[in-house]
Amino acid sequence: MKPAVVFDLDGTLADTVPVIAHHIAETITSFGTLVRPEDVVPYIGRPLEVALAGLTELPEDDPRIEEIITAYRIRWRSAVDLHGETLLLPGARALLRRLREAGLAVGVVTAKTHAIADHLLVSMGIRDLVDVLVGTDEVPRGKPAPDSALLALDLLGVTAADTWYVGDALSDVAMALAAGMRPLGVTTGACSEEQLREAGAELVVSSPEQVAAIILGA
C-alpha cells in the first residue's frame, strides 16, 4: 500500500480565499443582498449552497440559490482563466513534487465540484501532481461530513489513521476528524492558528515548506 497525503484546495494549495470572497460577495450583492468579502471568509470550505444560504438567509433549496451559484461560477471561471498559475500558493508545487518523489500519493478533497476543481488544478499547472481528486458533487454530503475524505481514502487505498489531511478551514479539521484522519492545519487561508487548534488540528503550520517538514520528517 502506497502512503498518501490528502489536501484541501482553496487556501491550502491555491491562494484563492481573497478571490473567492470577492466574487461571492459581488455576486450576492448583485442579487440585492449586500455582502462584504470579509463576511464570506468564514464560509469558505463549505459546499457552495450551504455558504450562500448562510450569507443570504435563504433556504438551501431556494431557486434563487441556484441562480446565484450559476452567476458566481461564471465569474469564478473567468477569474481562473485570467489569473491561472498566479493563483497557486507559493511553495505548493515544490511540496507536491517532494511528496511524490518520496513515494507518497497525493489526494485533493474539495468543496468545489470535481470539474471546477479540475479546471483550477489544470490552470495552476499542478493537475499532473494529483493522483486522486474528489469534489463535493461526488458524495452525498460535503464538508464537514466525512464522505468525500472517505471516498478519497478508498480511491487511494490507504487507511485513515495513517493519513494526514492538510487544510486551512474549520470544515477541513472537522471532516478529517470525522473520517479518522490526522488533521494538519495551515494558516495560509481562512483561519488562524488558534482557530485551527481549537477545532482539533493535531498540528498547525504556516507554509508548504513546514507541511513537507512534518510529513517527510525533514
Image (spheres, grey):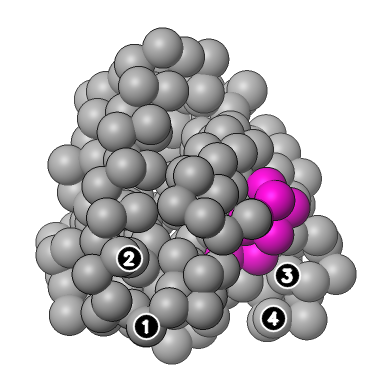
Q: Residue furthest right?
A: 194
| Residue 189 in the image, given as x and y percentages of width and height | 66, 47
Label 2–label 1 contact, CB within 8 A: yes
| Front position among marks 4 and 2 | 2
Distance from label 2 to label 1 (Cα)? 8 Å
The rendered magenta stretch, by its main secondary structure, is classed as helix
Three-letter amino acid code of the residue under disc 4: Ala
Q: Are marks 4 and 2 in contact (CB under 8 Å)?
A: no
Do callouts 4 and 1 mark residues in contact (Cβ within 8 Å)? no
Residue 103 in view: no
Above or below — where is 81 with respect to 32? above
Q: Are marks 3 and 4 in contact (CB under 8 Å)?
A: yes
Name the residue carrying label 2: 65
Answer few, some or many: residues within 10 Å of disc 2's Cα (few below 14, many 20 plus, some between 14 and 19).
Answer: many
Query: In x, y percent, where is residue 27?
Result: 47, 44
> Which residue does the image show at 55% across and 41% down from the upper left?
26
* Position in image of residue 149 (x %, y %): 31, 70
Residue 59's label in the rendered image is 1
